[in-house]
Image (spheres, helix red, strand yellow):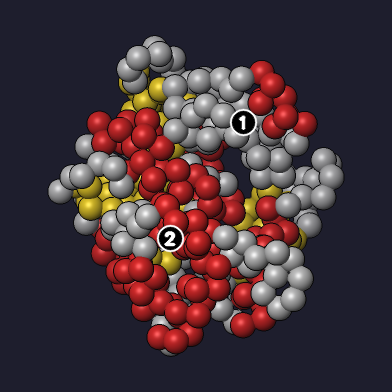
Amino acid sequence: MKRIVTIGGGTGQFALLTGLKTIPDLDITAVVTMADSGGSSGVLRTERGALPPGDVLRCLLALSTASDDVIGLFQYRLAAGGGVGGHTLGNLMLTGSAEQQQSFLEGISTIAKVLAVRGRVLPVTTSCVELCARLTDGTVLRGEHEIDQPNGHGRSRIAEVWLEPEATALAEVLEAVRQADAVIVGPGDLYTSIIPNVLVRGVTDALHAVCGPLVFVVNAMTKHGETDGFGVVEFVRTFERYAGRTVDTVVCNTRRPAPDVLTKYEREGAMFIAPSITEASETSPTSSAWGTRDVVAFPLLSDGPLIRHDPIKLAHVIRALL
């Protein structure tokens, strides 16, 4: 068995884990950000003092081997209105399980059994933290939801991010990272899903001690307000600045989205990230070198109206690196 640790949050980590669970010789641990403060998770944080369940739940569902009916039940969002309006049943069940067990970790373990999860899902910390950002114009934003949803198209770039208060990573997370045959970072929102994990005390030291390669999966698109104008190089170097080390392998997509789909995203300020470091054929990954980093480029996008990494393609590219 190869021990794989993924680091991130949001839909990017969901896609990666959905693919990785189909490969039988992988022992998977998903490390998840605890900085989420928007939507249902944000309400549960504010009203109940709960740790944000949303990203953890996504990872549990991605690794679930339960029936589609069970997974669909956990994903069901209650209609707006009333005390529980707008929440997914899964978020409520995970929060309730944590309250019943008086432990977020035990709550996750219980839901993992119900969903027949293949692998482990660990919050990077069980401390309550808030993600903060300083923009290049000096503006300070507090809360992941404030950083994630810019108002208008004229917001300054992000200069730096940090957590308040400082937090320490779970011992289980640090041990999993140190012993991993590979650590996979991304895809996902750079400043709000990926970097918050390495801001937690202990994670950067563990990344320096990891047994296998540190792999960074570059997003297919930029995100307005976070990574405007970023290319492959900017994504990688920004992560490395916070991680305190160079990544070993960079994985990037070469497939351009369909014109009509791309136009829809461009209206929202997102731009396609061209694989400017290397080119790839349509049938197999192409590897090259960028400094000390290996670069693997491959057509990774799935078909459909949303620009997403294809879970199976991405998972098999990752497996081929081991």
Q: Residue at x 66, y 26 (%)?
A: 261
Which residue position holds label 1? 305
> Image height check: is 252 above or below 197?
above
> Image height check: is 179 above or below 80?
above
Q: Residue at x 65, y 65 (%)?
A: 78
Query: Counting other residues with Cα less than 10 Å from the Cα at mark 1, is it few (<14), some (14-19), or many (20 or more)?
Result: few
Query: Counting other residues with Cα less than 10 Å from the Cα at mark 2, is it few (<14), some (14-19), or many (20 or more)?
Result: some
Q: Quadrant of residue 48?
A: bottom right
Q: Quadrant of residue 36?
A: bottom right
**Helix or strand or loop: what does disc 2 sit on?**
helix
Viewer can see residue 132: no
Which mark is in front, 2 or 1? Answer: 2
Q: Residue furthest front?
A: 69
Viewer can see residue 18: yes
Q: Residue at x 23, y 52 (%)?
A: 27
Looking at the picture, which amino acid does disc 2 mark? Val
Camera-side residue: 149 or 56?
56
Q: Residue furthest left?
A: 1
In this picture, residue 138 sits left or right of residue 40: right
In this picture, residue 131 sits left or right of residue 244: right
Residue 97: give x, y in percent of width and height: 45, 79
Q: Residue at x 28, y 56 (%)?
A: 118
Residue 107: give x, y in percent of width and height: 41, 77
Q: Which mark is residue 204?
A: none
Which residue position holds label 2? 70
Does label 2 or label 1 sit earlier along the sequence?
A: 2
In this picture, residue 9 sits left or right of residue 109: right
> Image height check: is 316 above or below 74?
above
Looking at the picture, which amino acid does disc 1 mark? Pro
Residue 49: give x, y in percent of width and height: 60, 82
**Helix or strand or loop: what does disc 1 sit on?**
loop
> Image height check: is 258 above or below 310?
above
